[in-house]
Amino acid sequence: MTRNGPVALIFHTAVVIFMLAPLAIVCLVAFTPENTLSLPTNGFSLRWFDAVFHHPDFVQSFWNSLWLAVLSATLAVVLAVPASLAITRWEFPGRGFLNALFLSPLIIPHLVLGVAMLRLFAIVGATGSFGWLVAAHIVIVTPYVMRLLIAAISGFDRSVEQAAFSLGASEATVFRRVTLPMILPGVTGGWLIAFINSFDELTMSIFITSPSTVTLPVRMYMYATESIDPMMAAVSALIIGITAVAVLLLDRVYGLDRILVGQH
Amino acid sequence: MSFLELKNITKRYGPLTAVGDVSLSVEKGEFVSLLGPSGCGKTTTLQMIAGFVEPSAGTIRLDGRDITRAKANSRGLGIVFQSYALFPHMTVFDNVSFGLEMQRVPKGERKPRVEEALSLVHLSPYAKRYPRELSGGQRQRVALARALVIRPPVLLLDEPLSNLDAKLREAMQFELREIQRKVGTTTVMVTHDQAEAFSISDRVVVMEAGRITQIDQPYRIYEHPETEFISRFVGKTNLLPGKVVTATGAGATVSLAGIAVPVEAAGLSVGETVTLCIRPEKLHLTVPADGLLTGRVADRFFLGSQWLYHIDGPLGTLMVVTANDGSTPAEPGATVGLEWSPSVVRVHRGAMAEAPDVALEVTG
């Protein structure tokens, strides 16, 4: 292993500080007893966390976002697995077009998508529907899942599947017992990235959420435009905390390397 | 009727014929190798037997049953892949057990059979490991155990040893043969390595450009190659272009750049262009006066058990291999004589396919 020189060390430290400082400050501010976002603060209090839990709108929005993210990530994976297998493995007319179509939401600004979806929802009479919100999120998270899956499937040794066939396995069994477990790092990694993208999404969701389906980012945005108080910081700190615990648990139970890097 | 029979098997990809009109009969318990350079169609032939590639024409029969269009998962053949193709997410035990599970062998019966297969390949202590924790040779054995545990009528080996290092490859060759003899499974192996094919096969099938050019026992293929291609592909050889000057019943004299060389070959006619083929180990170094030819030692290479000489002479550069029997080897620059017995010279009719200096390069 080569050691880093002093310049590289300083640079790395600066990058880490630059990335972590906002998170650390938000978490610190969340514990203030004051009525404003102030730092340094003159005490420690959980009153803003208490405020979040007594704010039914935020609690409602949190559950909305969680369900939305779980559903759209899961359905995107269900959609992307067969699509990626087809695109990577078979030559068929329209293959390039399909590939481009699946990846196009990556290059279309969410603002444009938001306006388009708003119009679409109005036409089909779906305004305020949670189902349609899920559909819109599937559109924007599928490309991420596809990218990871295509990478996982491209590096796949097909003779492993042939070996399973030769041992008498049916096509369904080969998929369930061999193909799926072997592309599992791509599947779980894709699901995680899709989940995070959906949970985070603000720009498009602003246009297409209704009072009953407002997601957490949209709720935070609306709240912050009206008043700035440390409750925002408390919500952020909670999200950071939940994410950190989830990632830690996942690493303990399953190993992040295995999910994201695929160390077989 | 033979146990495994390929009849006029052909595979075309568009205008390209990958395998053309291949017919082959394999007897029960036999070990047959398909040998040839890459792209000669040997792997495609194996995949057609396995059922991964559908033949464009011809039939494949196994024990009298037509399996030409049968699906790969209904043929019950054991296959060992070049990449081993182990299931990376399963332990060695589960890898071997997979085939039994697919055949709905009861659970209680599976365990002893997996253990038996693992002990056959000397891997019993590794049952709980994952493939990534094994060496190349061990993975190879798992692949073999996984293929054999289902008691297949035919075992197909696709370049099974090519990913191993030289020393291990040699050891595995003999072990493979020993295991095959023990279980008596009819085996078809694909390889580009002639040493591998020769040392473990009952018969070798030489393929060239999608066709079979010779089917014979290993010794016969080496000593009596039917085409110039085979003599060049199999082992090292000296190829010499010449013209027949006299021909009598069972013998003839061939002129090589003005030097008359007797050969034992019937049916040649005077004036015919021929190519002589002499294996380097069939040439002997002598004192200059005793030789059929004289030449100068241009270079010599020490190969351990043998010396390889390049001798410059009137016929160009000839390769000579002598056993390292402890005697003093010839020095570079020395003038030596070359002699050989007429019976070791093989005669191929027609001119050489390529320029002589290319043909004299070491191949195989």
Image (cartoon, coloured by chain):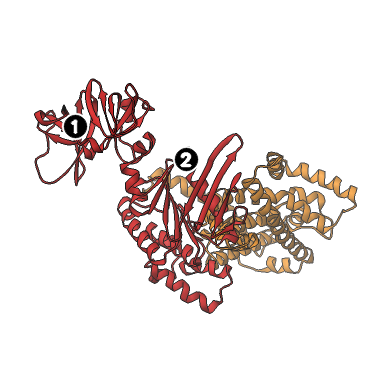
Chain colours: A orange, B red
Q: Residues within 10 Å of mark 1 (few under 14, many from 20)?
A: some
* Residues at marks 2 and 1 on the same chain: yes
Residue B338: mark in rendering: none
Residue A62 image point, x, y percent = 73, 63
The residue carrying mark 2 is B40
The residue type indicated by label 2 comes to: Cys
Element type at mark 2: loop
Which numbered disc flags the more N-terminal residue, 2 or 1?
Answer: 2
Q: Are marks 2 and 1 in contact (CB under 8 Å)?
A: no
Q: Which mark is residue B299?
A: 1
* Residue kind at label 1, given as amino acid type: Asp
Q: Chain of mark 2?
A: B
The spot of residue B70 in percent (x, y) is 62, 56
- Classify residue A231 by image quadrant: bottom right
State which quadrant residue A132 falls in.
bottom right
Residue B251 versus residue A221 in the image, above or below = above
In terms of image quadrants, where is residue A8?
top left
Image quarter in which the C terminus of chain B is found: top left
